[in-house]
Image (cartoon, rainbow, N blue to C red):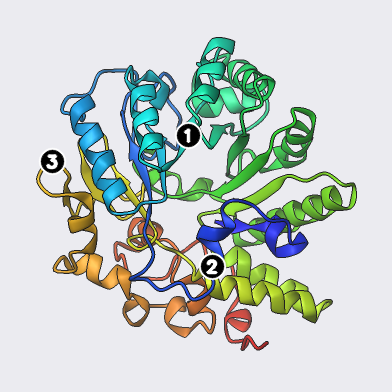
């Protein structure tokens, strides 16, 4: 994640201690864990990385197995569990799991499509001390419904947002940018301000699950740059108007470098602050500071890489699996720079990006160590030397 509000406006947030902590080392970082607690979903989104549908899936961890996982994560000092899916609110014991995680001192987040959040459920989420609820929208009105492939999904998600805001639950928007919906950006900005959302995350498309075939639906590099420019302009404008909201871009660490290079031309002092924060962040953290456990207990480098598993929590504790570098992929992920190819191998900013997403490289080139095709930095830009 790249915090645009932190880099441009110095606005603090809880995530700063995870993203911008000085002297972080790979060995000392404990991962945020995305727990895909169920694969079932009431929607049928075209870009779903878990390829979820509205059906029961066999072999999902039951309550006792899920609690054992949560206890293992607490013992391993995992700071945050992000309960995702499918649609996590379809899991009947979700609140039992949330309360258990909270009792062990783990911060909890729910990633949901928002369509099931009634007033009663919003209150229940608030009472469970959930730190944050992220609701996915991928356009306004019918644009979202076409993306979600369920009529009325936008209306229900908006109602869910309003129900959470009403009980003062911290809630934000998750928007995956594609060629089809990026013209809706300004409308999304208006929605975030109008509905009093605390946070908005703009996700770059990752080619996995049903999204594996969406390479051609991604933005061009030129469009990516325009989108980041637009998001940054809006963020600064809000700050100047006294509106404090957290704005982040997700799944493409080229954003931070692009922002640094852009600001360096007109405000070297601010650029130095941005560079320092990006140096602390260290770029993509798949297999390092972000991990995933799927509905069956398989451990993955991140939530998008379900095609490769390091082991199963029913057989070994998560911490043992995570620290076992006898797996060649895990070993390289934890210290990957010298294995990266193509544009990544030539880039002067590799320490800030760490090669971005391996899943996108795998989808496009069939080689997990090739350059990330979504990196939009030019050859001239990657040869610039970053200096304080």
Residue drawn at (62%, 34%) of the image: 170
The CA span between labels 1 and 2 is 25 Å
**Residue tagged 1:** 111
**Residue tagged 2:** 21
Residue drawn at (74%, 27%) of the image: 195
**Can residue 86 be seen from the camera position used here?**
no
Rate crowding at label 3 as few (under 14), some (14 to 19) or many (20 or more) other CA atoms within 10 Å. Answer: some
Work out whether residue 9 or residue 130 is closer to the camera in this orientation and state it.
Answer: 130
The CA span between labels 2 and 3 is 33 Å
Which comes sooner in the sequence, label 2 or label 3? 2
User: Nearer the viewer's eye, disc 2 or disc 3?
Assistant: 2
Quadrant of the rendered structure where residue 287 is? bottom left
**Residue tagged 3:** 314
Residue 178, placed above or below residue 94 = below
- Image position of 88 (left or right of 276): left
> Which percent across, then down, holds residue 150?
50, 18
Quick one: SS at disc 3? loop
Q: In the image as oriented, which residue stretches furthest toward the left?
A: 315
Question: Would you say the residues marked 1 and 3 are in contact, meaning their CB atoms lie under 8 Å apart?
Answer: no
Quick one: SS at disc 1? strand
Work out whether residue 215 or residue 148 is closer to the camera in this orientation and state it.
Answer: 148
Quick one: SS at disc 2? loop
Residue drawn at (34%, 82%) of the image: 338
Work out whether residue 120 or residue 357 is closer to the camera in this orientation and state it.
Answer: 120
């Amino acid at each position: 994640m790249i915090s645009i509000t932190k880099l441009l406006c110095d606005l603090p947030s809880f995530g700063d201690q995870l993203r911008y902590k000085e002297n972080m080392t790979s060995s000392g970082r404990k991962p945020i864990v995305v727990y895909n607690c169920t694969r079932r979903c009431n929607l049928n989104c075209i870009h779903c990385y878990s390829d979820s549908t509205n059906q029961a899936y066999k072999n999902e961890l039951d309550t006792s197995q899920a609690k054992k996982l949560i206890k293992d994560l607490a013992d391993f000092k995992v700071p945050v569990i992000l309960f995702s899916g499918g649609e996590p609110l379809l899991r009947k014991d979700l609140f039992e799991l949330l309360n258990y995680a909270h009792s062990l001192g783990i911060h909890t987040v729910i990633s949901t499509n928002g369509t099931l959040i009634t007033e009663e459920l919003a209150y229940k989420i608030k009472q469970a001390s959930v730190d944050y609820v992220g609701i996915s929208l991928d356009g306004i009105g019918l644009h979202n419904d076409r993306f979600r492939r369920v009529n009325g999904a936008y209306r229900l998600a908006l109602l869910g947002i309003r129900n959470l805001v009403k009980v003062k639950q911290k809630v934000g928007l998750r928007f995956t940018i594609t060629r089809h919906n990026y013209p809706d950006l300004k409308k999304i900005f208006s929605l975030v301000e109008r509905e009093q959302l605390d946070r908005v995350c703009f996700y770059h498309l990752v080619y996995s699950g049903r999204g594996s075939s969406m390479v051609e639906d991604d933005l061009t590099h030129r469009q990516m740059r325009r989108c980041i420019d637009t998001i940054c302009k809006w963020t600064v404008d809000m700050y100047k108007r006294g509106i404090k909201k957290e704005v982040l871009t997700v799944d493409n660490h080229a954003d931070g470098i692009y922002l640094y290079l852009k600001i360096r031309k007109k405000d070297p002092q601010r650029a130095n602050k941005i560079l320092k924060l990006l140096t602390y962040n260290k770029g993509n953290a798949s297999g390092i500071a972000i991990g995933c456990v799927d509905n069956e207990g398989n451990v993955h480098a991140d939530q998008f890489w379900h095609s490769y598993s390091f082991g199963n929590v029913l057989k070994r504790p998560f911490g043992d699996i995570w620290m076992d570098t006898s797996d060649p992929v895990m070993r390289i992920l934890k210290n990957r720079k010298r294995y990266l190819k193509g544009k990544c191998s030539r880039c002067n900013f590799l320490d800030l990006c760490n090669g971005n997403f391996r899943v996108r490289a795998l989808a496009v080139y069939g080689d997990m160590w090739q350059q990330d095709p979504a990196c939009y930095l030019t050859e001239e830009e990657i040869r610039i030397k970053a200096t304080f």
